Amino acid sequence: MVEKGTPGFKAKKIEGKMSLRMVQNANIKLHDCFVPNHNKLTYATNFEKSTGAVLLSSRIGVAAGISGLACGAYEQCLEYCLQRK
């Protein structure tokens, strides 16, 4: 784990997101960061594979949430249009 304040570590919060705004994301840049042995993740051997698995498993939840929001927006709009005079 790279701690804040480590030389070569920069993180910039992503602003103006359209969805999942409550999830805090950042663009992270690492340049020649030193990570002491006690901060290393012992079982993290393949970052791309493990991150890919997390992204793959979370996509269904994101898709379901967005689909629910879209259906709710459609139903509210339809109800409004039908009641409008």
Image (cartoon, grey):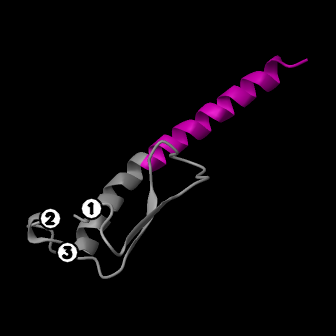
Q: Which residue is mark 1?
A: 3
Q: Which residue is mark 2?
A: 39
Give the percent coordinates (x, y) of residue 82: 80, 22
- Identify the magenta region: 62-85
Q: Residue furthest right?
A: 85
Task: Please state which amino acid type lies under the numbered disc 1.
Answer: Glu
Q: At x 9% / y 65%, what residue is drawn?
A: 38
**Residue 44's disc number:** none
Magenta span dominant secondary structure: helix
Find out whether the residues at labels 3 and 2 contact each other: C-beta distance under 8 Å: no
Task: Please state which amino acid type lies under the numbered disc 2.
Answer: Asn
Find out whether the residues at labels 1 and 2 contact each other: C-beta distance under 8 Å: yes
Q: Which residue is mark 3?
A: 46
Left or right of 73: which side holds 8?
left
Q: Residue furthest bottom?
A: 32
Give the percent coordinates (x, y) of residue 20: 50, 46
The quadrant of the rendering that contains the N terminus is bottom left
Q: At x 44% / y 49%, what residue is drawn?
A: 24
Spatial CA span between label 3 and label 2: 17 Å
Which is more N-terminal, label 2 or label 1? 1
Give the percent coordinates (x, y) of residue 34: 22, 76
Which is more N-terminal, label 2 or label 3? 2
